Image (cartoon, coloured by chain):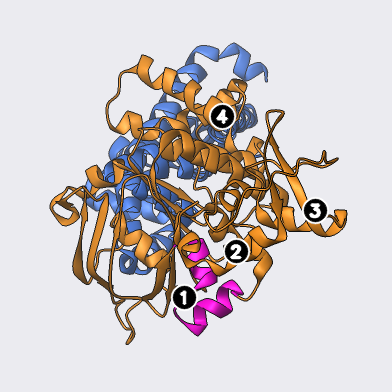
Amino acid sequence: MSMLVADELTKLFPGESQPAVDAVSFTVEPGEFIVLLGPSGCGKTTLLKMINRLYEPTSGRFFIEGVDAHDMPVTELRRRIGYAIQQTGLFPHLRIAQNIAVVPRLLGWPRERIEARIDELLDLVGLPREFRQRYPRQLSGGQQQRVGLARALAADPAMMLMDEPFGALDAITRTRLQDELMAIQRKLHKTILFVTHDIEEALRLADRVMVMKDGRIVQFATPLMLLAQPEDPFVAELTGASDLLRQLSLITVERALAHPGLQPSTDETADLTPLHPQDDLRLALTRLLSVGDEGLVVVEDGRTCGRLTLSHLQAVLRDPALLGAQR
Amino acid sequence: MTYLVQNWRSVGSLVVEHLWLTLSALAIALVIAVPTSILLVRIPRLRGPVLGLLGVLYTIPSLSLLVLLIPLLGLGYWPAVVTLVIYAQLVLVRNLVVGLTEIDAAILEAANGMGMNGWQRLIIVEFPLALPLLLAGLRIATLSTIGIATIAAFINAGGLGMLLFDGVRSSNQEKIVAGAIAVSLLAFGANALLRQVERWSRRGLDA
């Protein structure tokens, strides 16, 4: 069953002529990482906040695991959905442990289960357990956002809503947290709706990107599809779709080697800088150009598993089937 | 000083009276101010008129208010308590309203988004965050209540004011000084104690 089905969701704020979200319909499957992308005022945050009913839709309906969200008590709905925001919204008067425990407490979990869960979550988001007794102000911005993530995950919700959670962080911290969020997602398979206006972040994190403009969905597709086949000049402009390097950065060496149109090369000349199957093609191209060789050896765990050449890259960029595939 | 030492028993009972008057007035004032403030936060258009009214009441000189209440409530403890409660309202309500309305919108959004209902949000989030400002108001209210309670001796409400008025009536300098010192000590003590409580309530809030 689909995790989330939205049917003509519309939000018109009082006193405004244009709806912030205009008859939007879409479906999200369990375990998908969806990024809502668009300029400010495009309706992405409004759409997100309709899902946990911080905003009530003016019209339209949505279903969570097949149940009409309007028929659920609003507090119950919200406790079932993890929620993380940019300003973290951590409660400054509560210690880290108490902050993480809020939803489990609201749900009436027994004390021992809550305590065990706090330790588990601190480990998961990479914070030392000594932080339990600290207050949010005693933590750095990145650490606070980790606590925000742990708090949103506390009651093990199937779905998470994240509103520009890394927007206020410096570039290095943001990248690190993106990596860790992806690692956590590989482990937990949550259904995530993640709002951002940062195109790099969207392409990096998303299984599918929902590009929004003026309250409507312009395109809802995989990052690679957005780059390769933008359905709209707006999407093309937003993603800088002509950028080949960006496209290459979204495809792994492994995938290019598996491309059916090419013979696997047998030349096994030893190479000083072998590629790994999980490296992306952007890195591969950079290496190819700097080494000046025709091909590079791909090595995994000491075993050679192929040789990547420029013709692989060309074949991949010409192949729409490969572009449509998910990472 | 010698008066205080020699008459510690009678001064002591006056201190107890004074404390009782102050504490009961503050307790009643809090019971009124807390729900009033919550109401003003939830219904913003009431804020101006109610705070305005409390401001007007606050400007009435205490002696006049005490005397004005005599036809309604007579003499003694009750008119004094009513007067003290009225004076404490402005600072308590104003501080609590400011404390509750100044909470970061992101914090309230997080509380709602996590599935707290109105009461849970008030008890778990809003009230603790407004507490430092409420306690600051309570400290100021306590000091002014201790002071105004002295004047309440004029309408037979008892307390350390009795020493002062007796002293003035009988031209007993020692009594006046003793009364003044006792009231001051009481106020200093209350101030120090409430400062500690305030500091405790701010844990986590100051980085």
Residue A236 within the magenta-colored segment of the rendering: yes
Q: Amino acid at mark 4?
A: Trp
**CA separation, marks 3 and 1?**
41 Å
**Left of B186 or right of it: where is A102?**
left
Q: Amino acid at mark 2?
A: Ala
Chain A display color: orange
Within 10 Å of the Cα at label 2, are there few (<14), some (14-19), or many (20+) other Cα atoms? some
Q: Which residue is mark 3?
A: A287
Q: Which chain is blue?
A: B
Q: Which residue is mark 2?
A: A315
Q: Secondary structure at mark 4?
A: helix
Which of the labelled discs sits on residue B200, or is there none? Answer: 4
Image quarter where the N terminus of chain B lies is top right
Q: Which residue is mark 1?
A: A41
Q: Disc 2 or 1, which lies upstream in sequence?
A: 1
Residue A140, image quadrant? top right
